[in-house]
Image (cartoon, rainbow, N blue to C red):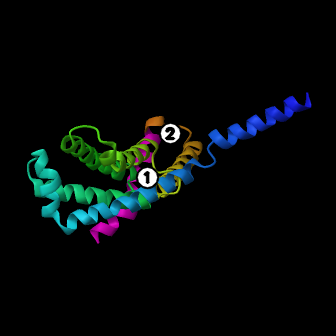
């Protein structure tokens, strides 16, 4: 009986260590920062000699506007990497990287005459990392999360204010409550974002 209990406890501990998430958000932070950090230099390499990149990678695919598309690829990698690192508009940054890497994978398949793992392995790792971030989001250690929390707290303050009004008047309708919430959100945007751009 004692050995069965001991074995059972060990299996539970082992399964927890092997399969349970200690911190998904910490893992996402590591994935975002490392992916962005190692990918960003590829974008800067492209801008250093854009003609060479266009000749080697864009023109062989017979795509129109090779110089323009080369700049798009470079700035997708640079901008997307920065967005991943700081966690701002993270899914858009990850999507930009997924798009650029998809074209690079296609180029690798076309130029090597098929699926060559030695050419594609790094591209597939970048694609997988950016794809995971696209599907899961940035996690709590990101500017996206900070912005959402600010907007959520503003919304909660507006809701408390409208409930107070509702208690006093006793006849505020649901439609009016929704309208007050919307007005509060746009007032928040105007006072915090639009006022800075207009001045």
What number is the disc on residue 21? Answer: none
Q: In terms of depth relative to the viewer, which is nearer, 13 or 184?
A: 13
Name of the residue lying farthest toward the top? 1
Q: What residue sits 27% from the left and 44% below the top?
A: 105
Q: In terms of depth relative to the viewer, which is nearer, 179 or 190?
A: 190
Quadrant of the image containing the N terminus:
top right
Spot occupied by residue 67 in the image (x, y as percentages of width and height)? 11, 58
Name of the residue lying farthest toward the right? 2
Q: Earlier in the sequence, mark 1 or mark 2?
A: 2
Q: Is residue 19 visible?
A: yes
Q: Is residue 190 visible?
A: no
Q: CA distance from mark 1 to mark 2?
A: 16 Å
Tell me the SS state at disc 2: loop
Spot occupied by residue 8 in the image (x, y as percentages of width and height)? 80, 32
Q: What residue sits 45% from the left and 47% below the top?
A: 137
Instruction: Residue under label 1, please give it.
Output: 184
**Lateral position of residue 139 relative to residue 62, left or right:** right
Neighbourhood count class around disc 2 (C-alpha, 10 Å): few under 14, some 14–19, many 20 upward: some
**Lateral position of residue 112 relative to residue 15, left or right:** left
Q: Is 177 within the magenta?
A: yes
Instruction: Residue under label 2, please give it.
Output: 172
Q: Which residues are magenta?
A: 176-199
Cβ–Cβ under 8 Å for marks 1 and 2: no
Tell me the SS state at disc 1: helix
Neighbourhood count class around disc 1 (C-alpha, 10 Å): few under 14, some 14–19, many 20 upward: some
Q: In terms of depth relative to the viewer, which is nearer, 39 or 172?
A: 39
Spot occupied by residue 90 in the image (x, y as percentages of width and height)? 40, 52
Spot occupied by residue 45 in the image (x, y as percentages of width and height)? 25, 65
Magenta residues, dominant SS class: helix
Q: What residue sits 32% from the left and 64% below the top?
A: 41
């Amino acid at each position: 009986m004692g050995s069965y209990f001991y074995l059972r406890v060990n299996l539970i501990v082992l399964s927890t260590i092997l399969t349970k998430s200690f911190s998904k958000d910490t893992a996402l932070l590591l994935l975002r920062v490392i992916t962005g950090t190692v990918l960003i230099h590829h974008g800067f390499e492209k801008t250093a000699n854009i003609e060479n990149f266009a000749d080697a990678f864009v023109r062989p695919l017979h795509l129109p506007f090779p110089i323009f598309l080369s700049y798009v690829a470079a700035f997708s990698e640079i901008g997307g990497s920065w967005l991943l690192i700081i966690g701002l508009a993270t899914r858009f940054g990850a999507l930009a990287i997924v798009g650029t890497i998809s074209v690079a994978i296609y180029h690798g398949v076309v130029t090597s005459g098929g699926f060559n793992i030695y050419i594609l392995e790094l591209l597939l790792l970048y694609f997988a990392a950016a794809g995971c971030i696209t599907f899961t989001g940035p996690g709590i250690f990101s500017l996206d999360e900070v912005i959402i929390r600010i907007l959520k707290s503003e919304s909660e303050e507006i809701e408390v204010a409208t409930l107070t009004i509702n208690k006093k008047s006793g006849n505020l309708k649901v439609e009016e409550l929704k309208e007050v919430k919307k007005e509060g959100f746009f007032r928040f945007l105007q006072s915090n974002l639009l006022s800075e751009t207009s001045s």
